[in-house]
C-alpha cells in the first residue's frame, strides 16, 4: 500500500515514574537555570509553596493565580511577577490551567518550562497555547510553547477526585480521537492515539474502583502522555473548535466540556470517515459516538451541556461562532448541522453514529 506522510517527533524530555517529582530541582539545573517560578492554581497554592520550599535556593517564588482558559489579563499579571523576581524558568504544577499559564509565559519570553501534571489533560506535551481575551478563545502553535521537561509522577495524582479524573481523562481522549482523522495524521500518531485510548479504556474504570492504586494512576498518566503527544503533532478539527468556543465565550469548565462533546463530534465525523475512526468503535464497542457515550455514562461522566449552565438560547450563538473561521474538518460543516449537534449535546442524548 502506498503511503505519503510527514512526521516530526516531540523534543520534550519525558520523565516517568513514581517519586520522579522529587528530582525537579535537578532538572532546573540541567536546563541551566537558577531562579524557578513555581506556578499553580489558587486551589493548589499549598502544594506550589511546598514545591518551592523543596527547590530551596533554586526557587524564585510562586504565582498561584492560574485559572481556566488562560485569560490574557492573568498572564499579564504573571509576567510582572516573572520580571520582578527575575525568574529564568517556570515550573508548572497542576492541570491544564497551570500548564496553560506556563506556556503563555514561555510564548512571550521563551523561558524554559518544567511541567509536573497532576491531572490527565495531556496539554503539557503540545506546542499549542489556547488563551482567552474579550470572550473569545484563540489558539497559537509555536515551538517556544512546548515544555522542555515533563515529569509524570503518579504519586501526585492520587488526590485528584474521581470525578475530575474522569473528565480529565475524557479530555485527553478527545485529543486522540481527533488525531485519528486529522488532515496531517501519520502512522505513528495513529498508533499512539489508539494506544492512548486503550490505556484510558482500562485505567478510568480502575481509578473509580480504587483511586489510590498507583499502578492504574500511572496508566492514566501514560494515556495522557500518548493522547497529548498526538495532539502536538497533528492539527485540530471540529471538536476542539466547538470546545474552544464554549469555553472561551461561555466559560464552561474545560474538561467537562470536552467530555460532553466528544461522543457527539466523533459521531458527527464518523459519518464521513468511518474507516479512520474504526479503532474507536473497536475499543468502545458499537458505533463510534454511541460507544464513547456509553463509556462516558458507565464511568459517571457529565453528558449534557445544560448541566454546565448553558441555556438553549446560547446554542445559536455558539453555532455561529463555531462556524466562523472553522478549523479543517473531514466532514463539511455548516451552521444548521452544528446547531443540531449542539442541541443533542445540550440534551445529553446518545449519538446514533
Image: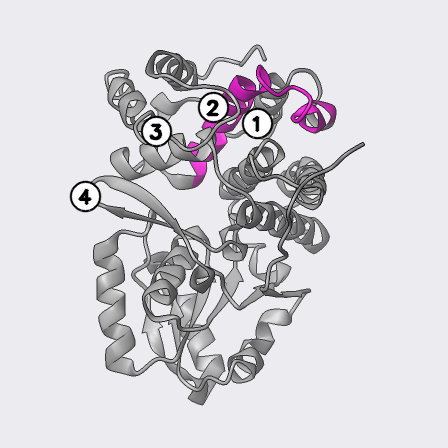
Using the image, determine if residue 233 lies above or below residue 336. Answer: below
Residue at the disc numbered 2:
303
- Calculate the distance from the C-alpha at mark 3 to the C-alpha at mark 4: 21 Å
- Calculate the distance from the C-alpha at mark 3 to the C-alpha at mark 2: 10 Å
Work out whether mark 3 precedes mark 1 in sequence or the reverse, and give the earlier one.
1
Q: Nearer the viewer, residue 276 or 103?
A: 276
Residue 65 in the image: x percent, y percent? 29, 61
Q: Residue at x 54, y 36 (%)?
A: 174
Residue at the disc numbered 1:
296
Task: Please tell me whether residue 254 belongs to the stretch shown in magenta.
Answer: no
Marks 2/1 in contact by CB < 8 Å: the verdict is: yes
Using the image, tell me which numbered label, if any, was put on residue 134.
4
SS for callout 2: loop
Q: Quadrant of residue 346?
A: top left
Using the image, tell me which numbered label, if any, was put on residue 308.
3
Q: Residue at x 46, y 54 (%)?
A: 95
* Main SS class of the magenta portion in the image: helix
* Left or right position of 323 against 160: left
Work out whether mark 2 precedes mark 1 in sequence or the reverse, and give the earlier one.
1
Amino acid at each position: 500500500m502506498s503511503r505519503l506522510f510527514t512526521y516530526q517527533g516531540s523534543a520534550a524530555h519525558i520523565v516517568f515514574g513514581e517519586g520522579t517529582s522529587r528530582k525537579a530541582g535537578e532538572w532546573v539545573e540541567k536546563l541551566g537555570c537558577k531562579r524557578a517560578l513555581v506556578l499553580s492554581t489558587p486551589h493548589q497554592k499549598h502544594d506550589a509553596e511546598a514545591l518551592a520550599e523543596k527547590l530551596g535556593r533554586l526557587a524564585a517564588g510562586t504565582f498561584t493565580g492560574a485559572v481556566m482558559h488562560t485569560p490574557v489579563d492573568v498572564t499579564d499579571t504573571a509576567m510582572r511577577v516573572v520580571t520582578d523576581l527575575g525568574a529564568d524558568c517556570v515550573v508548572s504544577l497542576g492541570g491544564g490551567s497551570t500548564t496553560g499559564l506556563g506556556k503563555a509565559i514561555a510564548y512571550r519570553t521563551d523561558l524554559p518550562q518544567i511541567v509536573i501534571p497532576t491531572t490527565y489533560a495531556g496539554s503539557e506535551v503540545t506546542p499549542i497555547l489556547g488563551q482567552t481575551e474579550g470572550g473569545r478563545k484563540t489558539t497559537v502553535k509555536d515551538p517556544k510553547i512546548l515544555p522542555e521537561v515533563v515529569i509524570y509522577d503518579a504519586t501526585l495524582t492520587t488526590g485528584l477526585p474521581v470525578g475530575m479524573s474522569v473528565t480529565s481523562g475524557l479530555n485527553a481522549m478527545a485529543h486522540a480521537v481527533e488525531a485519528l482523522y486529522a488532515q496531517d495524521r501519520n502512522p505513528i500518531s495513529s498508533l499512539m492515539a489508539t494506544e492512548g485510548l486503550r490505556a484510558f479504556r482500562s485505567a478510568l474504570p480502575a481509578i473509580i474502583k480504587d483511586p489510590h492504586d498507583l499502578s492504574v494512576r500511572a496508566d492514566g498518566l501514560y494515556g495522557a502522555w500518548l493522547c497529548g503527544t498526538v495532539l502536538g503533532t497533528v492539527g485540530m478539527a471540529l471538536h476542539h473548535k466547538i470546545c474552544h468556543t464554549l469555553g472561551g465565550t461561555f466559560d464552561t469548565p474545560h474538561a467537562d466540556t470536552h467530555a460532553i462533546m466528544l461522543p457527539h463530534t466523533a459521531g458527527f465525523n464518523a459519518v464521513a470517515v468511518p474507516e479512520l475512526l474504526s479503532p474507536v468503535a473497536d475499543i468502545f464497542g458499537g458505533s463510534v459516538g454511541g460507544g464513547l457515550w456509553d463509556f462516558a455514562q458507565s464511568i459517571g461522566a457529565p453528558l449534557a451541556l445544560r448541566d454546565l449552565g448553558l441555556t438553549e438560547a446560547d446554542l445559536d450563538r455558539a453555532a455561529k461562532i463555531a462556524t466562523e473561521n472553522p478549523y479543517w474538518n473531514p466532514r463539511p460543516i455548516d451552521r444548521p448541522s452544528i446547531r443540531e449537534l449542539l442541541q443533542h449535546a445540550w440534551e445529553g442524548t446518545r449519538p446514533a453514529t
